[in-house]
Amino acid sequence: MKRATGLAGLAFFGMWLASGGSLAWAQAENNEHLSGSPRHQEWVDIETPGGRKVHTWVVYPEVDHPATTVIVIHENKGLTDWVRGVADQLAEAGYLALAPDFLSGTGPDGGNTDAYPSQDAATQGIYKLPAEQVTADLDAVVDYAKGLSACNKVIAVAGFCWGGGQTFAYACHNPNIAAAFVFYGSAPRDDASLAKIEAPVHGFYGSMDNRISGDVPRVRQHMEKLRKPYLPIIYQGAGHGFMRQGESTTDPNDPNRRARDLAWQRWKNSLSKLSKN
């Protein structure tokens, strides 16, 4: 594994040069959690047993003890500034956060998310990823996190949209994670997969996202039958992607903003309980 450290601004400039400026769409959401963060942020390349390198954004909390760790799985847009900002917000709350780029090496000229010419192109790339590759990437990132002295060996996984579905799937694969936080992602449809889950699965859904939230009763029924911990909440008036959409407004009456704020509070409360166990 090779590590690349440095100021976020220098990393941004180097990536821009390497991509010929094509990452502009992925960086359009640059925010205070990246440009003004006092926390240590760095890029690392994590190597899987098969030799694939997973470009990963890591943010360290400012704490005096090893911290609970959250692996953040991005949406179907790839690893954007918004997802990197989420990682920084987790570190701000006291958690070590790692956000891998599952499009690592799949872009033009072997580039990452930032090498794709558009968001649509990145989304197309996401749906071409082999499921076993995504799982292997996650295994490598989890193993890397465990080896960090800043990690207390308690590792949770969280994801949004496509990443929410991958989070649910990974909970089926890895019985050793402490918790799974599924933000508006689909669940596996077979009981054989769900039966392998050992960690509590916390679900965050919007009522206006029936494509996903409409399946919650079925998932709850199957998880209850299997006696697996599933804790879904549907936020009234919120749509798909409310964590991202809610961050774009300060209007407290906006349904997405309200859902986003409540979900963050719930997420951090759940993480704090993991840290105490």
Image: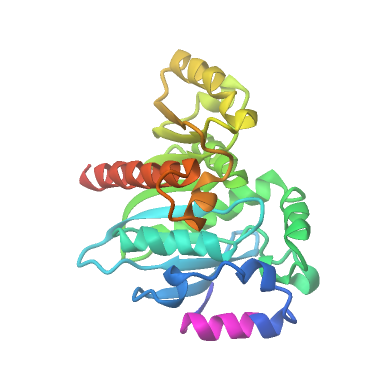
In the rendered image, the quadrant that contains the C terminus is: top left
Identify whether 69 is placed above or below 271.
below
In the rendered image, the quadrant that contains the N terminus is: bottom right
- Tell me where residue 177 appears, x and y as whole percent: 41, 43
In this rendered view, identify the residue nearer to me: 180 or 10: 10
Queried whether the magenta region covers residue 13, the answer comes back as yes
- Tell me where residue 5 appears, x and y as whole percent: 47, 81
- Tell me where residue 227 appears, x and y as whole percent: 41, 18
Q: Main secondary structure of the magenta part?
A: helix
The number of callouts visible is: 0
Left/right of residue 125 with respect to residue 171 in the rendered view: right
Left/right of residue 158 with respect to residue 215 in the rendered view: left
Q: Identify the image's colour scheme: rainbow, by chain, secondary structure or one colour.
A: rainbow
Q: Residue at x 57, y 20 (%)?
A: 191
- Tell me where residue 151 appears, x and y as whole percent: 33, 60
Q: Residue at x 33, y 53 (%)?
A: 153
Is residue 144 among the parts visible in the rendering?
Answer: no
Is residue 152 among the parts visible in the rendering?
Answer: yes
In this rendered view, identify the residue nearer to me: 255 or 40: 255
Identify whether 42 is placed above or below 182.
below
Queried whether the magenta region covers residue 151, the answer comes back as no
In this rendered view, identify the residue nearer to me: 150 or 161: 161
Left/right of residue 166 with respect to residue 179 in the rendered view: right
The magenta stretch is 6-15
